[in-house]
Image: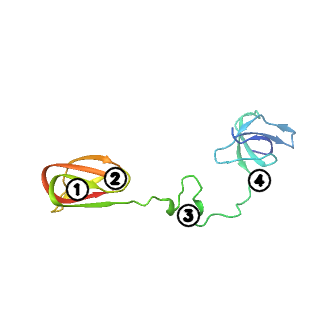
Amino acid sequence: MKKGIISTTDNESRKARVLFPESNSITPELPMALHISEIHVNDTVLVEFWGNSLAEGIISENLSISTPQSIPTKISQLENDAGYITFAEVPQASTYTHVQVVPSSIWTINHGLGRFPSVAIVDSAGSVVMGNIRYISLDTVEAEFSAEFGGKAYLN
C-alpha cells in the first residue's frame, strides 16, 4: 500500500491517476474502490497494488475526506438520500366500506378512491364470500355472486 496524490480524476468513470512524489512516478488510470464516492485533484489517497506494475492497483482510501460537518440526526433529514423517504411522503392508504343492505346477486360499488382497489366481501354473518369482481372505472366496482345476499365489501 502506498500513499499518493491525485493528479487527474474522472469521477464519472471512477478512475484517477496518482502521483507518488517520493519516486516521482505516476500511475496510469486506476479504478476507485466502490465505497469512495468521489475524489479530487490534490486529494491524498492510498493505493493498494497486487503486482509490481503501477497499473496493477486500486485506489482504496481517500485520506483527504474530512468528517462531515453535520450528520443527520432525524429520519426527516434523509428525505433526499436514495432509499429514504419521510413519513409525510408515505402514501396514506384510503379505504372504503360498502354496506349492501338489500340482498342482491350483483353489487355496484361506487367507492370514489380513484384507482382499482383490492376487494374483500363478507356476508351478514361475517363469512368471506368469493365472487366475480369487475372494475367498471377507477371509482366503480361491480361484484357478481351466484346467489343474492347482503353484507359488506371492504376496498383498499
The Cα–Cα distance between marks 2 and 1, rounded to whole angstroms, is 17 Å
* N-terminal label among 4 and 3: 4
Give neighbour class at mark 1: few <14, some 14-19, many 20+ (Cα, 10 Å). Answer: many
Tell me the kind of residue under disc 1.
Ile
Label 4 vs label 3, nearer the camera: 3
- Please give the residue where the numbered disc 4 appears in the rendered image: 64
Q: What residue do we see at 39% from left, 59% from top?
A: 93
Q: Position of residue 51 (x, y in %)?
A: 72, 34
Helix, strand or loop for disc 3 = helix
* N-terminal label among 4 and 2: 4
> Which color scheme does this rendered protein use?
rainbow
- Please give the residue where the numbered disc 1 appears in the rendered image: 121
The Cα–Cα distance between marks 3 and 1, rounded to whole angstroms, is 38 Å
* N-terminal label among 4 and 1: 4
- Please give the residue where the numbered disc 3 appears in the rendered image: 75
Give 10 or 116, whichever is nearer the viewer: 116
- Please give the residue where the numbered disc 2 appears in the rendered image: 139
Q: What residue do we see at 29% from left, 55% from top?
A: 110
Q: Quadrant of the N terminus?
A: top right
Label 2 vs label 1, nearer the camera: 2
